[in-house]
Image: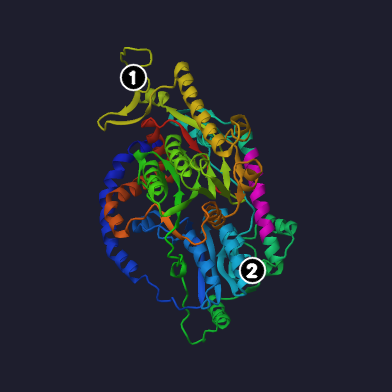
Amino acid sequence: MKPFLKFFFASALGTFCAAGLMLLLLTVFISLIIIFSGSGKESANSPILKIDLKGIIAERESKDPLSAIFFNFGIKKQGLNDILSAIKNAKDNDKVKGIYLNTGFARTGIASMQEIRNALIDFKESGKFIVAYGEAISQRSYYAASVADKIILNPIGMLEFKGLGSMQQYNKGIFEKMGIEMQVVKVGTHKSYIEPYTSYKMSSYDREQKSVYLATLWKEILGGISESRNIPADLLNRYADEYLLFSAPEDLLKYGLIDSLAYKTDFENSLKEMAGIDKSEELKFLEPADISGTESVAKEKIAIVYAEGSIVSDAEEDLYSDQTITAKTYVKTLKKLQKDSSVKAVVFRVNSGGGSAYASDQIWHSVRELSKIKPVVASFGSYAASGGYYIACGASKIVSSPVTLTGSIGIFGLFPSGEKLADKMGASYDGVGTNKNTLFGEQILNIPFLDAGILPARPLNKNEQAMLQSYVERGYDAFLSRCAEGRGMSKEALDLIGQGRVWTGSHALDNGLVDALGGIETAIEMAADLAALEDYSIEEFPKQKDPFEKFFEDLFKYAKIRGLEFILGKDGYETRNLLNALSNHDYRQAVFSIFPP
């Protein structure tokens, strides 16, 4: 009962916590001013570009100071756009002698690491050095860092190397003890998002698709490391079986996974020597933001529209402004680009596992209308699945990373019933209505005195289930129709590769879901070709608000969300948002269950 009561009073307690957290937020404000005012380009003349393969790497850096400090718990958040641009610019910058990869545990998708890795491989054509150093190196960071000329580990450091896996919690038993039944209407045999709510274990369909795409991703990672480190893939697999995280650094050296062991001070001295810096001088570095961006002032532009995070209805707008894709915002942005005569082509960068089917359809429509006027090339990051694929399928062309998780063409509706819980609490219901289904959705378990409606207090009857199943099937048919139109395929052919099935980018190319493999640079080049552009500048959208304006705008809102997350936990908060969407009649969801390998 305690978990339920925790969820039960969350909204009220979250608001209460907001008042206390606001005081904390205000005390941080002065620190933020110091941090932002002190950030500059004091090391702009350094000959070494430092790339941090650690912390959070999003599609682009958040300009929201509250998000950076409170939602990311102080963990550094970088923009992939800055990193890729900096590496590209450093290649042709005579002042830059090399790149230092500061490796650690990175929170980002495999596709992002692959794009960084490919940019570093291109940089090596300049003949400049790349060295990597780490004290605790994650498998993903190592994948990118393996292209370095040398990888140095701290003498008591650690390297994670274990293969890929997917583990998740199944909560049917918890709901049963609480007296809650989760009812599902869906289309898609492989649509696994709902399984943690309705099952005790992984279905055979989900086990099959995850086994296939994990094996494909791992093969890609092994192939890259094998080529860079000159270690046979089967030998790397044997090392992965040993787990390696707790292995002696000397063993890692013997296996050829690293090149040497050194303390950081010694490494920094050798770094000075490589860059031609006197040992007595202070070692400073170029940061990606120092040399990222384009210097082109061409009037003709290619717009990059970043769409990262969950796709939400307007009711949830700006809860995480830099981590959600809100229909209202993106429809407005795409309409603006449609009318902007200086924008000759658009790259629609998608990194999303989906969300609201309604919101996805609104964005899809805007993308399709824009593509009728000017080229729109969709570029997929680590995820472009379910609603993430939906919003992109109207683009002129689609470019995917080989390791993008995409597809998952399917829709579901999730409807909780608290009948047993209502009975335990002593609630009873009675009412009248003029028509057969007048009272559908009206029987809600309510908390006396708080006037807090929690969930439906009875299960769906057969007639209601049939209506909702028909509603979801129409949504799936619309999804198929959008994809078939965009991909030039029949709905029957799309259905064979749909059914909620998740594909890697390389498999998506084989089955016609995408047009080419590559990163965002490939998409930009394709957009330029389609628009017949030789000289162009890049402009990013949606426009990010001034960080201090955003600070005051979101002060109370962020405090409340943090309070809710503290009480409910991250998963509980996301479940609450899903139920809120359903209560706003956003019944159809196009979501891929993301448990990153």
> How dense is the environment of label 2, judged by Cα within 10 Å: few (below 14), some, or many (20 and up)?
many
**Depicted 107 relative to depicted 374: above or below:** below
> How dense is the environment of label 1, judged by Cα within 10 Å: few (below 14), some, or many (20 and up)?
few
Question: Can residue 513 be seen by looking at this rendering?
Answer: yes
Q: Is residue 437 left or right of residue 521?
A: left
Residues drawn in magenta: 208-224
Residue 109 percent location from the top left of the image: 54, 53
The residue closer to the viewer here, 575 or 478, is: 478
Quadrant location of the N terminus? top left
The circle drawn on residue 428 is: 1
Amino acid type shown at disc 1 = Ser
Q: Earlier in the sequence, mark 2 or mark 1?
A: 2
The residue closer to the viewer here, 386 or 226, is: 386
- Tell me, yes or no, whether the two marked residues, 2 and 1, touch with CB atoms within 8 Å: no
Query: What color scheme is it?
Result: rainbow
Q: Is residue 66 left or right of residue 209?
A: left
What separation in Å lies between label 2 and label 1 (alpha carbons)? Answer: 65 Å
Residue 417 located within the stretch drawn in magenta: no
How many numbered marks appear? 2
Amino acid type shown at disc 2 = Pro
- Tell me which residue sits at (64%, 68%) in the image: 249
The circle drawn on residue 249 is: 2
Residue 577 lies in quadrant: top left
